[in-house]
């Protein structure tokens, strides 16, 4: 209990850990003479939604021109209404609190600043506007993890002032510079990624620099905000984390590096999802995702359904989807001997073939040993046995990498 300036006492009551738990409390006061007073009993109940969903990932298949449906079960184990909304972006204009963003590294100076901002009033800043950034720095700003859909992009704006080389033959070199790197294993390992059009500068060779000589980089005498964009299409359907890494050598420094309006965006034109939904407390609901092949070429398409919701600590969730679109090839039927037949189809190397059969045109079953077969140049065949059935259908699907 704390005595306030106006003579009132206030008490901080810890909230329970689980939704629906009630919490009762009262206040007791005793003076030096032993007089005692007890307040009425008060209480409250914590209410919020609690999210669970399945499957955690999915692989779906259909042929060219067809579609299929992926059903995601969304469950609310909490005691308040769960509201969710499909999204195709994660945008960070930079707020006054870091949220899920972290930073660290030798001589780290990353912080939220109001000195320069593209979207006022805040930006991330690595440096010191009065004294310059630190020497011997290798400091990184880490984004929260994000599940990427198809055709993913990263875009941000930056304002930079870093130590320039500029000697004859080194007009595009910087002693200090910045790079962007990505992790696909939860931040254990990071690999470099290049912006669209490549990095404009390179790092000058220096024994104490955290970067290798001539490493492509962002440099800095921008004199204003510039946009940088990255194509992350190769990471579709993956959970990734990006870091903004700034390094300096051991001598001259400058003002530093401002970063603002960081946005991940993606789109899966073959995946259609409801725009939003509600799940009542203690209930579940099915979200139907339609995967349409349309006229797209056969092959595997990686993407994700992603959504935001009002469940505390679970504000973003999603299902990575691997969508296999197959093409059909024509087959020729020849009889070999009594009770047997041969199916032959044109094939080529580099492709995969999937043979299936059915007694109707709706329930196809892969033939053991003849699914996911590497193609060979020319033709491939299957020898079958005639069965005592009114009719039987065969289908060969061609899968491109």
Image (spheres, helix red, strand yellow):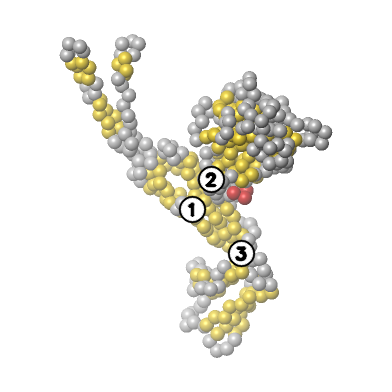
Question: Which residue is pictured at 50% across the width and 28% down the height?
Answer: 97
Q: Where is residue 105 in the image (x, y as percent from the top left)?
A: 56, 35
Q: Where is residue 347 in the image (x, y as percent from the top left)?
A: 66, 71
| Quadrant in the picture for the C terminus | bottom right
- Horizontal side of 125 relative to 165 (left or right) equals left
Quarter of image, res 299: bottom right
Disc 2 versus disc 1: distance between alpha carbons? 22 Å
Of labels 2 and 1, the one closer to you: 2
Question: Which residue is pictured at 61% across the width and 46% down the height?
Answer: 191
- Horizontal side of 34 relative to 257 (left or right) equals left
The answer to which of marks 2 and 3 sits earlier in the sequence is: 2
- Horizontal side of 224 relative to 64 (left or right) equals right
Q: What element carries label 1?
A: loop
User: What residue would you read off at disc 2?
Assistant: 188
Question: Which residue is pictured at 45% across the width and 49% down the height?
Answer: 287
User: What residue would you read off at disc 3?
Assistant: 399
Residue 161 tag number: none
């Amino acid at each position: 209990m704390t005595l306030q300036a106006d003579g009132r006492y206030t008490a901080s009551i810890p909230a329970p850990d689980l939704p629906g738990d009630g919490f009762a409390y009262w206040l007791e006061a005793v003076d030096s003479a032993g007089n005692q007073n007890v307040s009425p009993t008060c209480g409250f109940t914590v209410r919020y939604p609690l999210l669970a969903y399945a499957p955690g990932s999915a692989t779906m298949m259909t042929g060219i021109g067809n579609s299929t449906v992926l059903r995601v079960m969304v469950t609310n184990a909490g005691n308040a209404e769960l509201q969710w909304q499909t999204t195709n972006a994660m945008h960070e204009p930079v707020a006054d609190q870091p949220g899920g963003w972290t930073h660290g590294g030798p001589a780290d100076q990353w912080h939220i600043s109001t000195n320069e901002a593209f979207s006022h009033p805040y930006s991330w800043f690595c440096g010191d506007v009065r004294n310059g950034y630190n020497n011997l720095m290798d400091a990184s700003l880490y984004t929260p993890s994000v599940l990427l859909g198809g055709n993913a992009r990263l875009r941000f704006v930056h304002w930079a002032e870093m130590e320039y080389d500029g000697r004859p033959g080194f007009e595009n070199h910087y002693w200090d510079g910045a790079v962007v790197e990505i992790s696909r294993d939860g931040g254990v390992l990071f690999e470099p990624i290049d912006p669209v059009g490549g990095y404009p500068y390179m790092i000058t060779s220096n024994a104490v620099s955290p970067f290798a000589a001539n490493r492509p980089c962002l440099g800095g005498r921008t004199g204003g905000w510039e946009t940088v964009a990255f194509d992350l299409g190769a990471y579709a359907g993956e959970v990734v984390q990006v870091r903004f890494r700034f390094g300096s050598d051991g001598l001259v420094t400058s003002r530093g590096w401002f970063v603002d309006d960081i946005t991940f965006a993606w789109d899966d034109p073959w995946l259609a999802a409801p725009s939003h939904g509600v799940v009542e407390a203690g209930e579940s609901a099915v979200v139907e995702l339609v995967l349409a092949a349309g006229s797209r070429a056969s092959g595997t398409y990686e993407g994700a359904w992603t959504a935001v919701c009002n469940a505390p600590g679970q504000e973003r969730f999603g299902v990575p989807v691997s969508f296999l679109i197959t093409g059909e090839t024509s087959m020729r039927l020849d009889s070999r001997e009594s009770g047997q037949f041969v199916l032959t189809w044109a094939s080529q190397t580099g492709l995969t073939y999937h043979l299936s059969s059915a007694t109707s045109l709706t329930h196809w079953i892969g033939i053991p040993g003849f699914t996911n077969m590497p193609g060979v140049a020319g033709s491939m065949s299957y020898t079958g046995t005639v069965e005592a059935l009114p009719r039987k259908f065969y289908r060969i699907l061609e899968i491109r990498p």
